[in-house]
Every structure is written in C-alpha cells, then in structure tokens.
Amino acid sequence: MDYPPVSVVMPVRNEERHLAESVRHVLGQDYPGPMELVLAVGPSTDRTEQIARDLAREETRIAVVTNPSGKIATALNLALRTARHQVIVRIDGHALFPPDYVKTAVAILAETGAADVGGGHGRGGRDPVPAGRGRGA
C-alpha cells in the first residue's frame, strides 16, 4: 500500500501533565508515510502553550496554532486550516493511541472508502472503526 501524507490535529488546553507524552506517542506512530502534528492551543492556566512551543522548536513535524476561544470546534477548524495534508487524524491532548493506530486507520480508509474512522479519545484509545465514505481518519 502507498501510504498518503497525514496531518494529525490535536486541540489542547490545560494539558501540561499529558501533552509531551501524547506528542511522543503521535510522533512515534509506526506509520510509513509522511506525518505532521498540528497543535491548536487554547488559553490555559498551566504551561501547555509553552510546552507546545518548546516541542515545536525541537521537532519540525509539529506546528502550533493559537486558539483564543478555547473551544474545541474552533481549535479543530484552525488546525485544519494549518494542516498540509488531505488525510486528517484527530486526537485529544491526553490520548495515547497504540503505535499502529494511524497506519490501521489509513488502511481502513483505503480498504473501505469510509469518510472517517472512529476511535477512542481517552488514554489508551481503541481500534479504529470505519464510518461513512470520503476523507478523514
């Protein structure tokens, strides 16, 4: 299979305790294609924004966008505008998906023509499940 480039979008706010670990899990995915991570950072009462910017300075695959409203829908829209790739994977700032999550989700998209592939949003995640037809993961 030819794996397409993927943009992972992650809305974050007050994720100081989990952000670095979640980012490591995203960047550590066993995905053979190009991948980027877009962090949409809402107003936080902790060091989330500083951690996100530090991570982006250390890793060229990370982009940070500011989400002044702090709303998840706004964060996702801002991240999607910044994303460079057509296949989008959405993950929460405290989620830890298995190392093959993105590869499995993209394979399911290719096999089924699904619009998106759903999965867990908590720590540990779960296996992707196809839903509908079109673009997304």
Image: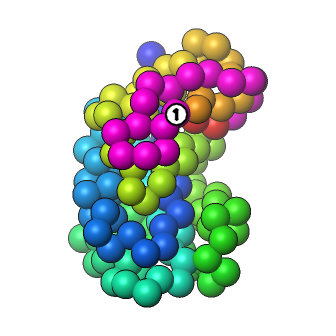
Residue 35 image point, x, y percent? 41, 46
Q: Amino acid at mark 1?
A: Gly
The answer, for residue 67, to whether it is visible in the render is yes
Q: Residue at x 36, y 46 (%)?
A: 123
Q: Residue furthest right?
A: 133
Q: Residue at x 24, y 70 (%)?
A: 58
| In magenta segment, residue 96 | no
Q: Which residue is mark 1?
A: 119
Residue 92 image point, x, y percent? 48, 54
Callout 1: 10 Å neighbours few (<14), some, many (20+)? some
Residue 40 image point, x, y percent? 53, 69
Quadrant housing residue 34: top left
Q: Is residue 93 left or right of residue 50?
A: right
In this view, 62 is above or below 131: below
Q: Main secondary structure of the magenta part?
A: loop
Q: Quadrant of the N terminus?
A: top left
In this view, 1 is above or below 103: above
Q: Nearer the viewer, residue 38 or 69?
A: 69
| In magenta segment, residue 123 | yes
In this view, 132 is above or below 118: above
- Magenta stretch: give its range: 119-135
Q: Residue at x 43, y 53 (%)?
A: 36
Quadrant housing residue 104: top left
Q: Is residue 89 left or right of residue 60?
A: right
Q: Quadrant of the C terminus?
A: top right
* Model colouring: rainbow
Q: Residue at x 33, y 29 (%)?
A: 100
Q: Residue furthest top?
A: 111
Residue 18 image point, x, y percent? 31, 63
Asked which secondary structure carries label 1, the reply is loop
